[in-house]
Amino acid sequence: MCLSSTLSKLDNTISFFHDAYSCYEDYLAASFPFGLYKQIFLPSEMVVSPTSFGASTCIFSADILNDEKVIDQIIGTRIKLAYALARQWFGIYTSAEEPNDGNYIYLLDHMWYYLCR
């Protein structure tokens, strides 16, 4: 979901996403733990941080959307989107002992890293 003025950038940026989603399902032999997955892209002045995670929802700054002319930044953007999906996937199976538990964040980050290797 994004503002209509950035729709072409959205199409270009997330065109790979179905492949990443399918790859995760095949590799993990498990369906996504939520019924839906939503990505929301908002103008940077409307977001608190570049990426925010919630149950089955990720909110991104629209600044990460790229049109087809920008090829050097698209790989980094796709990595961020794949990371957000993996974090949703693994986050449902693990829980933090404390709200800002560094070990929990470390675990999620490294599970994602393992998945991408």
Image (tube, grey):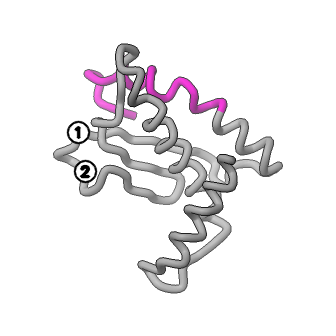
Q: Extreme top residue here?
A: 69
In reply to whether residue 11 is colored magenta, the answer given is yes
Q: Amino acid at mark 2?
A: Val
Report crowding for label 1: few under 14, some 14 to 19, many 20 or more residues within 10 A (C-alpha).
Answer: few
According to the picture, the residue beneath numbered tag 2 turns out to be 47
Q: Quadrant of residue 36?
A: top right
Report crowding for label 2: few under 14, some 14 to 19, many 20 or more residues within 10 A (C-alpha).
Answer: some
Do the CB atoms of the residues marked 2 and 1 lie less than 8 Å apart? yes
Tell me the element at label 2: loop
Camera-side residue of 68 and 41:
68
Q: Extreme right residue here?
A: 29
In reply to whether residue 92 is colored magenta, the answer given is no
Which corner quadrant holds the N terminus? top left
Q: What span is colored magenta in the figure?
A: 1-19
Q: Amino acid at mark 1?
A: Pro
Residue drawn 35% across the image and 30% down it: 65
Q: Residue 43 shows which numbered tag? A: 1
Residue drawn 36% across the image and 25% down it: 66
Task: Give me the C-alpha separation between circle 2 and circle 1.
Answer: 7 Å
